[in-house]
Image (spheres, helix red, strand yellow):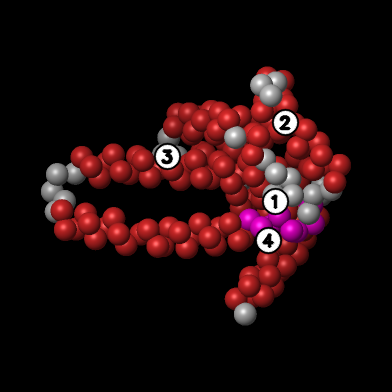
Amino acid sequence: MTQPGEENADLALMQRIAGGDEAAVSELYDRFGSLVFRMAVQTMPTRAEAEDAVQEVFVRLWKTADRFDPSRAALVTWVMLIARRHLVDRLRRKRARIKSTTLNESAGQADADASAPIGARMEDRERYDALLKRIDSLPELQRTVVTRTYLGGQTLRQVGEELGVPLGTVKSALSRALVRLRERMGEGLS
C-alpha cells in the first residue's frame, strides 16, 4: 500500500488539478507522462495516434481529478487504469468505424458478433480491476516494478535506472511480486 504521506501528497496534487492549477497538471505529466506514452505506443497502431491518445488521457485525468480517492488505489494505479481504459475505448471506436464501413457483413452475423463479446468484456474488466487491487496491495517497490513493466511497458533495466535501484533488486522485486500475486489469485479462486 502507499504510505500515508504519499497518499496525502497525491491527493493534494489531484485536488490542485481539480482546482485548475496548471502547474499541478504539469507535475502530473512529469511524473506519469512517459509511463502513459509507453503504454500508448505499445497499444496504438501509429506514433501519432499514441501521442494524441496521451493528450486525451491527461485531459481525462484533469477532468476527473476530483474523483481520485487514495484509499481505493495508488495514484500510479489510478492513472494507468484511466490510461488503459481510454486506449481500449479508442481502439474499440476505431474498430467500430472499420466494421461499419465493411459492406459484405450480414446483419445476422453482426448481431451474433455484437452479443457475444459483452459478457467476455465485463469478465475481463472485472478480472483486470481485481488484479489492479492485488497489485495495489503489494509493497511499494514491488508495486512500482509490476506497474511499470507490465502496465507501462518498461524494461527492468529502465525501471532500475529511473528508480536508481540496481537491476538485481528490480528483478528480485518483480519475482517476489509475481509470487505474491499468484498466491493471491489462488486465494481468490477458492
Residue found at the very far right of the displayed protein: 5
Residue wearing tag 2: 15
Point out which mark residue 72 bears.
1
Residue wearing tag 4: 134
Which residue type carries mark 4?
A: Arg
Q: How far is the residue under mark 4 from the one under mark 3?
A: 26 Å
Residue 41 place in picture, x, y as percent = 51, 38
Residue wearing tag 3: 90
Mark 4 neighbour density, 10 Å: few (under 14) some (14–19) many (20 or more): some
Which badge, 1 or 3, comes first in the chain's sequence? 1
Which residue type carries mark 2?
A: Gln
Q: How far is the residue under mark 2 from the one under mark 3?
A: 27 Å
**Magenta region, residue range:** 132-141
- Of labels 2 and 3, the one closer to you: 2
Q: Nearer the viewer, residue 118 or 136?
A: 118
* Residue 164 in view (yes/no): no
Please indicate whether residue 182 sits to the left or right of residue 162 in the image: left
Residue at image location 19% in from the left, 44% down from the top: 102
Which residue type carries mark 1?
A: Arg
Q: What SS does tag 1 mark?
A: loop
Mark 3 neighbour density, 10 Å: few (under 14) some (14–19) many (20 or more): some
Asked if marks 2 and 1 touch (Cβ < 8 Å), the reply is no
